Image: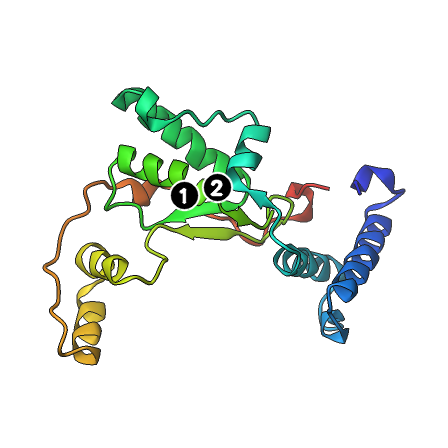
Amino acid sequence: MQESDYPSREAYVEARLAFLKKRLKELGGDEFYNVPCMDRETELTFLEQVYAIEAEPTVTYAHQLIAKGVELPSPDTMDDDTLSCKLWEVIHGLADLRVFLENTGHLTDRELYQQLWTDALNEFTWDMSHCCNGAMHLDLLGSGSEEDTRIWLASYADDIQREEWATQFPDESLPAKQKPVCERDQILPKPNYGLGMDDCDG
C-alpha cells in the first residue's frame, strides 16, 4: 500500500487506517484501537506502531540489513580498522530501520560487532522500518542478568542510582565505578520523534 496509489493524502490515510483496524481485529484487537481523541494522521502513526508490535515477529535485523545491501562478514575475517567501519555501517543501517543501540560503551568495537553478529542481529523481531515515530531500542545490557546489572552499575549508573540500588540490596556488594572503554554512546544515532508525515515512508 503506497500513498502514490491514492488520489490524495486523505484517501491514503483512510484506506491505511481501515486496513490496520481490520488486521488488528483479526489479531484479536477490539474497539480499543478506535481512538476518537486523535486526529487521523496521529491515529495512523499510533496504529502503525501497534500493528508492528501486535503482529508476530517475522524478520531478523540481519535479513533486513542484507536486503538493504549491508553485508555482514564474520568478525574473524576483518582487521580492526575494517571492522570498525563495518560496525558503523551496521549501526547506521539499523537506525534506518528505526532500531537504535543503547549501552554499548563497555564494549570495544570488536566486542560489540561480535555480539551483534552472533546474537542480536539474528533474533526474530518486528519490522519497525515503516513507522514514522516508532522505534526499537536494542539495549546491550537488556537481558536483566546479574552480569548485565553489574556492568550497568559500574559503567552507566549515576551516584543516585547506585545509592538507590545499594539501599534496595544491602546484602549485595556494589561494584566499583568504571569508565566505559568507549565513548560511542554519545554519538550513536538517536530516534527523532514527531516527524512530519511527509518524512514517512508511504
Report whether 78 appears left or right of 31. Answer: left
Residue 131, horizontal then vertical, whole percent: 63, 49
Image quadrant of residue 32?
bottom right
Residue tagged 2? 122
Residue at (82%, 37%) from the top-left corner?
Answer: 4
Residue at (84%, 56%) from the top-left corner?
Answer: 14
Residue at (76%, 61%) from the top-left corner?
Answer: 40
Q: Is residue 74 above or below residue 17?
A: above
* Kind of residue at disc 1: Asp
Q: Secondary structure at mark 2?
A: helix
Report whether 78 appears left or right of 14. Answer: left
Color encoding of the figure: rainbow
Q: Is residue 135 above or below residue 68?
A: below
Q: Residues within 10 Å of mark 2 (few under 14, many from 20)?
A: some
Residue 98, horizontal then vertical, whole percent: 53, 45
Residue tagged 1? 119
Residue at (65%, 61%) from the top-left corner?
Answer: 54
Q: Quadrant of the N terminus?
A: top right
Report whether 69 appears left or right of 43. Answer: left
Residue 125, horizontal then vertical, whole percent: 55, 50
* Residue 170 marker: none
Q: Secondary structure at mark 1?
A: loop
Asked if the residue at tag 1 contacts the one at tag 2, i.e. Cβ–Cβ closer than 8 Å, the answer is: yes
Image quadrant of residue 6?
top right
